[in-house]
Amino acid sequence: MEEAVGAIIKEYLELETNLIERELKLKEVSGKAVSIVGVRRSGKTSLLLHHFQKLRNEGKSVVFFPFDDDRIFPPTLDTIRTVIKVAKEFYPDGKIHFFFDEIQEVDRWELAVKRLVEREGHYVFLTGSSSKLLSKEIATQLRGRTVTHEIFPFSFREILKLHDIGVSKYFTESQEAKIRRLLRTYLEWGSFPEIWIKKEFADSTLKDYVNVMIYRDVIERYSIRNYRAFKLFLKLAVTSFSTRISISKIANYMKSLNMSISRNSLYSYLEYCNDAYILFPVRRFSYSLKEVEQSKPKIYAIDNGIVRVFSHKITENIGRLMENVVFLELRRRHKENENLFYYITNDGKEIDFLIKNGEVELVEVTYDLDQDHVKRVLRALNELGVREGTIVTWDTEDTIEKEGKTIRVVPLWRWLLQHSARPS
């Protein structure tokens, strides 16, 4: 065991890989582990490796260890103890930065991590995901002894960086044309890193992602027996992205197909998908908590590529795809959808997003700008006593001043570049 562990540690110390630098920056925190959580294939391991290589190149004491390596599988708590022992032989003095990937493979791993960060003062970075332990549950296991960072698939800013386009205030006409072409691809194919790196396998890759998410992160995790009902629910929910859904109507529809399923079960399915970072429900804004909880949820998907797997007419939904992308940029800043809502005006018109973070911010998304959208945003601003709002469009840019209110009209690509920089 010790020889295998030592070999793995040494291999990573000598590893040289060309990794894409992500917007999310990791920082060690004294006395706490750092957990990286997110959907499968969003780049958690790559982010971990990138930070490991950065610290290694700076001369820091670092150890990277993947607990799904076949040479030590299945790992146990003794495996972690051996990793720690060998690491201290590599670095007999000072604090060590431990990078533990796929940590969920080890039962009771949190005992060793607590000892490292609390009693010995080392630094620990963690990530992992499987049916054994959902990504976000890694942080839960440490009970306040961790700082958690969520990672999502590529932001549009990262896509531009991948294509050597720097973000600035001004772009040439040719650059802007390229940006719009990339945005169209981004909307229709999504933003999972592998899709942009190995484009020729995009369709099959996305289908594989969905199957793994369904089976390992939901079916196995929650021991769902009615697989047929769950898969139909997921298809109905995903194809209803960027719209409000009625759980009661879905239950009735499924019963018309001779599927016996309760509304409570469907609500549980939605919660499971949220926990696995597949679907995100957004509730209607109200000052009454009861009204918020009883409102119909609007559903957003983790990535437009997931929508593509379930929908055969994805290009016909360009406005909804735009809205889903806007949601994901907002979601990067608001964990668990905290402070994110949709709003219904007194005359029944919907505003796509209300962000309540101290001040209230309104964002409406539409492919083409028309007076109806201007009127509904203006009405919402007046009802809420807010001075400014935003309408995100495909290519219209303007500033509308009416009734003492200001509505900024911004093309989606500009809005994404302004908003996708994520705080560390």
Image: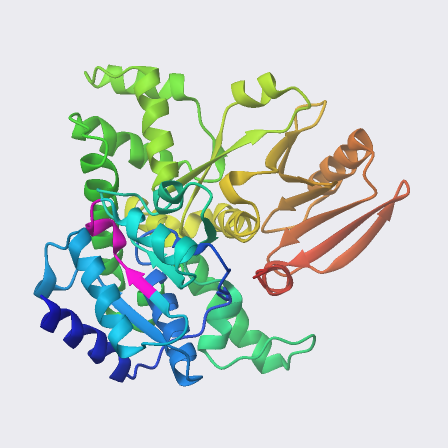
Q: Is residue 189 above or below residue 21?
A: above
- Relative to the observer, which residue lies in front, 90 or 209? 90
Query: Left of 414 or right of it: where is 145?
Result: left
- Relative to the observer, which residue lies in front, 66 or 383? 66
Query: Left of 153 or right of it: where is 105?
Result: left
- The x and y percentages for residue 13 are 27, 80
- The x and y percentages for residue 351 are 64, 36
Q: Is residue 287 above or below residue 183?
A: above
Determine which quarter of the picture holds residue 402: top right
- The x and y percentages for residue 118 are 42, 53
Q: Is residue 169 above or below residue 82?
A: below
Q: Is residue 221 above or below residue 40?
A: above
Is 72 in the magenta?
no
Highlighted magenta segment, given as a residue range: 99-107
- The x and y percentages for residue 34 are 43, 57
Determine which quarter of the picture holds residue 63: bottom left
- Relative to the observer, which residue lies in front, 379 or 314? 379
Q: How many marks?
A: 0
Tell me the residue at 22%/71% (across/down).
Answer: 86
Q: Decide if residue 150 is in sight here.
A: no
Determine which quarter of the picture holds residue 12: bottom left
